[in-house]
Amino acid sequence: MESINAKYVSQKISKTRWSPVSYSSLQQPEVFAAGSWDNEDNKISIWSTGNQNNSGLEDGFEGDPQILCEHKHDGDVLDLQTISVLQQWPRAHSYPCDNAPCTAVVCSSPEIVTVGEDGRIVVFRADQEGAVRVIENADSSTIHAVTYLRTTEVLTVNSIGQLKLWDLRQQTSSPSQILSLSGDRAPLHCVDRHPNQQHIVATGGQDGMLCVWDVRQGGTPISLMEAHSAEMWEIHFHPTNPDHLFTCSEDGSLLHWETASHSEMPSFLQGGRNSAVNSHGNRPLSSAWLSGDSGKGRLETTHMLPSQTMSVNSLDVIGQCLVCGTDGEAIFVNRRVPV
């Protein structure tokens, strides 16, 4: 745990996000944003990991993160995304008599998609003042998270255990596909898609279970794994090495999941019963994430924080750099994640 730096910030941290870098340049991120919640005065703050002037150091990191600037935020910060424009859209989500929390946002410049407790999906463009499109009754329950599946399709998860696929090219208020948990259908809080195989989607929710779905097959999850003992707040595939997955939870833990393949070839390039043909020829593609019960033995998990205390609400990972925020009023940065 020597590679982890903890910065105590006197605020509960709800969201942490690295400023994007070019994956092709192998550059490591140096700046991140953090948002707070459940404080008298909530803030959005920008931090530096302190290595701009230490680029010659072999480990690339010394000392605590340093704050660059901060700005007061009305209400809890429920999500953070980076886009190079200054714009504000008031009352993007609302009830008939009051504002409704905007629970999540996802960007694919210049488009921005938001979801909320009001069950609406709203599409904005960074260069326009008003909403481009509003799906008024997208859901009868709270939509907790949203992510892009493809350029024109987004996935949402809700409080009744459903995963919905929306084709934004279609002028309909109905999803093109609905997948659902079976049994008690615990609320789903987070969703991410595999960066190389977009039909593979991972979700987490109130019961702490890690669910992996194949949207080509529909129905119910391919894999269900006991991950956390309380709500799972965020889930992220590593953006360039998706054999690695990260989850964080109300139980105070942050887990690193790794597919334990016996071959030097990554699991998503190996053949198997869930294989498919890629666009460059006949080489089979598969993923350990779709192996169901037979794949659970191929997954290794590592606790990324020195101790489990208060809720870990958010995480982000780029390259070997991970940042997370907690209810313990701490931000943790690890710049040597083994991926």
Image: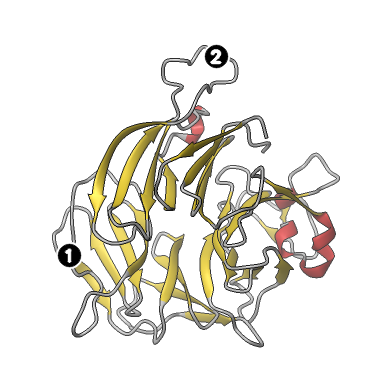
Q: Is residue 44 above or below residue 48?
A: below
Label 2 sits on a secondary structure element that is loop
Residue 147 is situated, as x and y percent measured from the top left of the image, at 45, 62
Q: Amino acid at mark 1?
A: Pro
Residue 234 locus on image (x, y percent): 53, 59
Residue 197 visible? The answer is no
Residue 134, compared with residue 10, is above or below; it is: below
Quadrant of the rendered structure where residue 296 is? bottom right
Which of the pair 138/25 is nearer the observer?
A: 138
Q: Residue at x 46, y 22 (%)?
A: 51
Asked whether 271 or 46 is in front, the reply is 46
Q: Is residue 114 left or right of residue 61?
A: left
Taking depth in this image into account, of 284 and 37 the one nearest to the observer is 37
Residue 186 against residue 64 in the figure, above or below = below
Q: Amino acid at mark 2?
A: Leu
- The secondary structure type at the circle numbered 1 is loop
Image disc number at residue 57: 2
Q: Position of residue 263 (x, y in %)?
A: 83, 43
Residue at left 42%, top 20%? 52
Q: Which mark is residue 90?
A: 1
Image position, residue 191 (x, y; %): 52, 64
In the picture, the quarter occupied by the C terminus is top right
Q: Answer with mark 1 or mark 2, whichever residue precedes in sequence.
A: 2
Quadrant of the rendered structure where residue 206 is? Answer: bottom right
Around disc 1, counting alpha carbons within 10 Å, would you say few (fewer than 14), some (14 to 19), or many (20 or more)? few
62 vs 139, left or right, is right
Most extreme residue toward the top, as rendered?
56
Name the residue rendered at 60%, 84% in the picture. 185
- Between the residue at mark 1 and the residue at mark 2, the CA separation in whole angstroms equals 45 Å
Residue closest to the far left? 129
Q: Quadrant of the N terminus?
A: top right
Observer able to see residue 100: yes
